[in-house]
Amino acid sequence: MSTTTSRLRLYRFASPATFYPLAGKLVPWFAAVAAILAAWGLWLGMLRAPTDATQGDAYRIIFIHVPAAWMSMLLYVVMAFWAAVGWAFNARLASVVARAIAPTGAMFTFLALWTGALWGKPTWGTWWVWDARLTSELILLFLYAGYLALVSAIDDPRRADRAGALLAIVGSVNVPIIYFSVVWWNTLHQGASVSPAAAPKMAAIMLQAMLLMTLAFWAYAFAVIFVRARAIALERDNDANWAGAAVGRAHPQSEATT
Amino acid sequence: MSTTFAVLVARDLRLAARRRIDAALPIAFFTVAVSLFPLGVGPEPQTLRQIAPGVVWVAALLAAMLSVTQLYATDLADGSLEQMLLVPDARLAIAAAKAASHWLVTGLPLVVVAPVFGLMFDMSGEAIAALVASLVLGTPVLSLLGGLGAALTLGLRSGAVLLILIIVPLCIPALIFGAGAVAAVDAGQSARGHYSLLGAVVIFTAVLAPIATAAALRIATE
Amino acid sequence: MIWKSASEFFAMGGYGTYVWGAYIVTAACMAIEPIAVALRHRRVRRELAAEEQRR
C-alpha cells in the first residue's frame, strides 16, 4: 500500500499545476548556484591558473568552450529523453520540458562553435578547422535547428510534440554514427597530424576551474529551462483552472514577476 | 504485408509513368546542380577530378530530398493516403513501399546518369565504377530517410526546405562513406572499408527507417 | 593572482581579442537568454491575469 501511495505522489510532479510553483521556487536557487560556481570557476581559471607553455593565455577560452560543448551534447540527449517520455506516456509536461530545453541547447552549441573558432585562430591559424569535434558540433547545431524548425512549423501542439520527439530520438540514435563517420572522414583527409582541438596538458587547477564552470552552466541551464517551461505551460493551459489560480493567487493585484 | 507492398509500389510506378515530366524533374535538377560546379570553381581538370565524387554525391542528395515531398503530398491531397492508412497494420508496408518507389523513380535514374558526369569531370574508369557502386548503395538510404522526412513534415507549408534541414544531417554518414569510397579508388587505395561501412548504414537504415516513418505517419494523421 | 596589473589581465599575453571576444559573446548570450525568457513569462502572466479579470 505504501509503495502505491509513494508512486502516486511522484506522479503529482507530472502535473503542470504542481510543477509550476515548484519550479518557480527552485529557479532563484539554481541561478544563485550558477552565479557562485561561475565566479569561483572564473576566479580560478582567469586569475589563478598559470599561463600555458604552448598556447599562452589563449587557452583560457577552454573554461567556456568545453562546458558549452558538454552542455550542448548533454541537453540534446536530455531533450530527446523527455520528449520520448512525453510521447510514450502522453505526459504533456514532459513534452513542455523538452521544448523548453531546445533553445538553450542550441545556444550552447552556438557558443561552443564561436568560442572554438576564437580559440582556433591564435592556436592553429584559421578561424575554422574541419576537425572531428568542431564538425560534429556544427552538425549538432543542425540537429537542434531541425528540431526547432519542425516543432514551430506544426500548429497543433500535440502533433508538434510527438513529431519533435520522433525526430529527437532519431537524432540521438544517429549522433554516434554521425560522430564516427566524421572522425573517419577527418582521419582520412588530415593524415597523421595532431588534432588541433587537443587541450593543453591540464594542471589540476585548470581541471578544477573547468569542472566548476561546467556545473555553473548546468545550474544556469536548469534555471533558464525551468522559467521557459513555466511560460510554455501557461501558454498552453491558458484556460485551465491551475493557470488562473497561479496567476491570480500569487499576485492578487496581477503584478507579475519571474 | 508483401502484397500491400507490391501493390503500392506498382501503383506509384504507374502514377509516375503517367507524369513522366514530373518524374524527370529530379534528374534535371541533378544535371543543373552538378554542371554549376565547374562554372563556379573553374574548368581545371585536376580540380574537377578531385571534387567530382563530393559534387555528384551532394547533388544526388539534394535531388533526392527535393523530390521526396511528392511521395506523400499528392496522396494526402486527394485523400488516398488516409484510405491507405485505414488498412490495419499497413503503415509499415506503406512506408517501405513509398521509399522503394522513390528509389526506383528517382534514385535509380540518378545512378544511371552519374557516369555521364563522371566523364564530364574527367574521372577515371575505376572511379566512375566506384561512383556508380557507391550511389547504388547510398541512394536507397536517401530514399528511406527522405521518406521519414516526408512523413514528419506531411501537409506542412514549409515542406521541402524544412525536410532538407531535418533530414540532411542524418544523411551525412552515407555521404561521407559514399563519396569517400570514390575518392579512395581515385587515389589508388582500397575502398573496402568505405563500402562495408556504407553497407552497414544501408542495412541499419533499411531496418529502422520504415518503422520510424510508420510512426511519423501515425503522428501526422491522427 | 598571476597577473601583475590590470592591463596585463586585459592583454591576455597578446591574445586579448580572442579571449575577450569569446568571453564577451558568451556573457552576452547568457545574459540575454534569461532576460528574454523572463520577459516571455511575464507577458504570459500579464495576459492571463487580464483574462482572469475579465471573467
Image (tube, coloured by chain):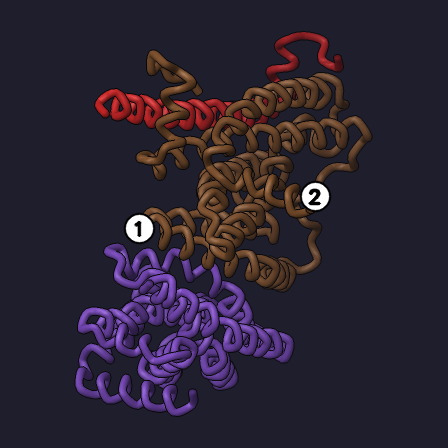
Residue A254 % position (x, y): 33, 16
Query: Which residue is at the front of the view, C20 or A99?
Result: A99
Q: Amino acid at mark 2?
A: Ser
Q: Is residue A175 above or below residue B45?
A: above
Task: Answer left or right for A81 relative to A39.
Answer: left
Q: Residue at x 31, y 35 (%)?
A: A239
Chain red in the figure, letter: C
Chain brown in the figure, letter: A
Q: Is residue A203 visible?
A: yes
Q: Could you say whether the residue bearing mark 1 is in a helix, strand or loop?
A: loop
Mark 2: give few (<14), some (14-19) or many (20+) Cα within 10 Å: few
Q: Is residue A101 visible?
A: no
Would you name the residue on which mark 1 appears? A156
Q: Earlier in the sequence, mark 2 or mark 1?
A: 2
Task: Answer left or right for A199 relative to A15.
Answer: right
Would you name the residue on which mark 2 appears? A2
Confirm or deny contact between disc 2 and disc 1 (CB under 8 A). no
Query: Which residue is at the front of the view, A175 or B77?
Result: B77
According to the rendering, which colour does chain B have?
Answer: purple
Residue A44 % position (x, y): 73, 20
Q: Which image quadrant: the C terminus of chain A?
A: top left
Task: Answer left or right for B121 relative to B13.
Answer: right
Q: Residue at x 53, y 66 (%)?
A: B173
Q: Could you say whether the residue bearing mark 2 is in a helix, strand or loop?
A: helix
Task: Answer left or right for B189 relative to B206.
Answer: right
